[in-house]
Amino acid sequence: MSFRSRVGDDALLDVTNMRSVLADHYDLAPSMEAAEATRDIHARMARVVPLADWAVYAPYVIAINRLKKERDAVVLAHNYMTPEIFHGIADRVGDSLKLAIDATEVEASVIVQCGVHFMAETSKILNPGRTVLMPDMEAGCSLAESITAADVETMRARYPGAPVVTYVNTTAEVKAASDICCTSANALQIVNAMEGDTVIMTPDKYLAQNVARESHKRVAWWDGSCIVHELYTAEDLRAYRDSDPEVKIIAHPECTPDVVAEADYTGSTGGIIDWVHRHKPGKAMLVTECSMASNIADALPEVEFARPCNMCPYMKKISLEKILWSLHSMTGEVTVDPAVADGARRAVQRMIDLSRKLQG
């Protein structure tokens, strides 16, 4: 049985069957004994996950960590995962660039991608001979859904000769239609390294506009956006700063340019984490997805986090229960057409190689 959320009675039937099968193989009842046995793991998130909640999560964490060894599996988790996933079962964590690089370095036979679907595709593209599992195939991305390979060709026709830099938040087909990929961490450097005066960026218009403000290139963009980051407004940030002048505002570059202009620092999720660790502000507002602050709170007890909460509904489809089911049943395998994968791999690998070169 392949678990995939669907509408209607079939979805309920899948979930019911999944839970029945898992209950037959694992003791998943809330357990203070399991919570006590995993206090070292809980300590990484005790500030944001009460012990009573951990008693619910701990049996799943124990089962997953045991099953990872049996399956020769590694869990790659994005910074937007919830704390019980981020700290409880992840072997590698990071932003899109780091996870793409990590996917080329892991030696396990199975990769479980805790993030959204394009990330799992990227891992499969870079590891065609390995099994890549996606705990919920419907964990998509508004950016990835905003553009097709045909749309890339439309942009090429509009700007003849301009190289196409495509954000990794895209499908394999779109990557394959592009010249090189980028992440929010390296977008400016990648754009500046391209030949010619004009560069096409897809699909995030706000990332492109923020890059254009700092680049010496003419940047043309596709009209896509992130449903999480576009909700933040400069007016809201100004109001918050007026009420609390000491707060440091740290924004993701998928936010609108006027939001970025209000920020004390702008960077990728990995860059945001590094900045807060380096500067340790007394108060910090992370203008990005909800789970970011929760995942770094215990490592930074001296920082008070203001937590405006815009949640990514796609990221939150990934749960401990679905991860356990995916590993138990070995379902949710991600496949990419070999011809598409070859083109996408070139674009992703060019990004990784150029990023390493630019970093010296």
Image: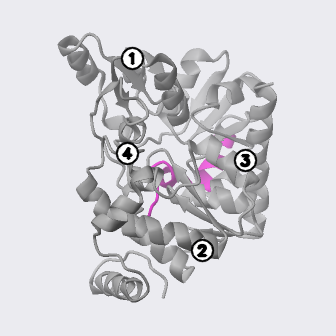
173 falls in the magenta region:
no
- Seen at 42% across and 26% down, the residue is 251
Q: Tag 4, which secondary structure?
A: loop
Identify the residue under disc 2. 333
**Comparing labels 1 and 2, the label whose residue is closer to the camera:** 1
Q: Position of residue 68 (x, y in %)?
A: 59, 69
Identify the residue under disc 4. 45
- Seen at 67% across and 15% down, the residue is 216
Of callouts 3 and 1, the N-terminal one: 1
Of callouts 3 and 2, the N-terminal one: 2
State which quadrant residue 219 falls in: top right
Mark sitting on residue 348:
3
CA neighbours of label 2 inside 10 A, class few (<14), some (14 to 19), many (20+): some
Of callouts 1 and 4, the N-terminal one: 4
Residue 287 vs residue 177, the one in the foreground: 287
Amino acid tagged 2:
Glu
Q: Are marks 3 and 2 in contact (CB under 8 Å)?
A: no
CA neighbours of label 4 inside 10 A, class few (<14), some (14 to 19), many (20+): many
Magenta residue span: 138-157
Identify the residue under disc 1. 281
